[in-house]
Amino acid sequence: MNDLLKLISVGENEGLEFKESLRLKEEIGQAVSAFSNARGGSILVGVSNDGKVIGVDIGRNTLEELANYVKRNTDQAIFPSVKILDAEGKKIIVIEVKESAEKPVFFKNHAYKRVGKTNQQVSSSEMRKSAKESGAEVYWDEQVCEAATLEDIDEEKVRPFLRRARFERRLEVSPNISVREALERLNLIKNKIVKWCLEHGLREPDFEEIAGGFLVRFYAPEDILSLIPEPGKIDLDKLGLNERQIKALGLMVNEGKVFTNKEYREHFGVSNWTCVDDMKLLEKHGLVIVEGKGKSTVYRASESPHESKKKLTKKLMVGEKRLEKRYLE
């Protein structure tokens, strides 16, 4: 038994977490935050919660994109060690996270801690207590105010700053432009264009003033032709579905399974609100029909070979793999 299999055989614990696939990026990011705020730890992607080796598909830029995702969404920025190892002939991604010298480390504006083999969100009171006990200086003016909006910024204070900055720092930002545009040009806020590009794994665009105009230069991915969808083809990965939703949809499509709220909760071990949220997203994309109300609510696939008695008109894909396994004529 090699070292990786020995590690897997130990099972999840305070310093080790398993993730079935890269579709669970949100949970991976939370684990990175939790390990950074504790004594460090390792995340194995391609291993189920019960220690079964599943493996993951590795693309040319998989590791780079994963590392960039973690770096982009953590504060302090975390640069984990990411590598590929073999176990039972399958590829496993190993993410090693060291304890951070500066705590807490946030993931998407929330800090997490490790409790046993789970990641729990750290409350504001816990952060204040931790900072007080450590004797560290807490610069509250550097903390993110999540509830703040542009309307909370005092325009009368921004404009004098812009005029002074043009003179003292040679900043090429006019004091007469809108507050939003000024902050965007100073890279103090991300505009919707930049946010959209980063969320879709694209390089951040360049902004440039030319002859009184404004140029935005976008960078296309290397495999741009592969992004053109085949007619009638739906890639479930790109819809943002998690592993649980895809498994549920597979049961509904392939086996004609009809879920009640209780059956879904018991099958996947989730709460009522998680069940409702999962099905709302599937319904939003037209993949599931919700029938009934209250306890009589049931969820069924919007298109199933067992009901239509014909081939499906949509191709439901998970990356390059097809969701449907069989058809009825």
Image (cartoon, rainbow, N blue to C red):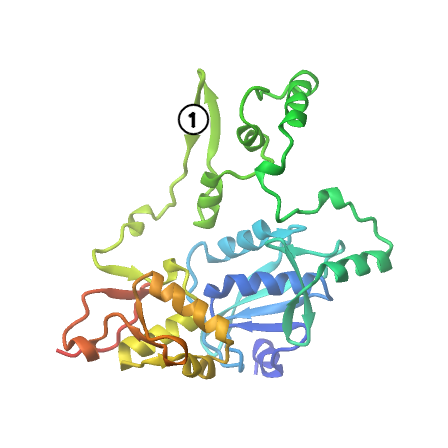
In this picture, is 198 found above or below 301? above
Quadrant assignment, res 10: bottom right
Residue at the spot x=63%, y=73% of the render?
Answer: 118
In this picture, is 97 found above or below 74? below
Instruction: Residue under label 1, please give it.
Output: 215
Residue at the spot x=57%, y=55% of the render?
Answer: 70
Indicate the secondary structure of the residue bearing disc 1: strand
Image location (x, y in percent) of residue 146 = 62, 49
Image location (x, y in percent) of residue 74 = 62, 53
Image location (x, y in percent) of residue 325 = 26, 76
Asked if residue 46 shows in the view, the reply is: no
Residue at the spot x=60%, y=81% of the render?
Answer: 11
Question: 219 or 309: which is nearer to us?
Answer: 309
The amino acid at mark 1 is Leu
Quadrant assignment, res 67: bottom right
Quadrant assignment, res 295: bottom left
Asked if residue 200 shows in the view, the reply is: yes
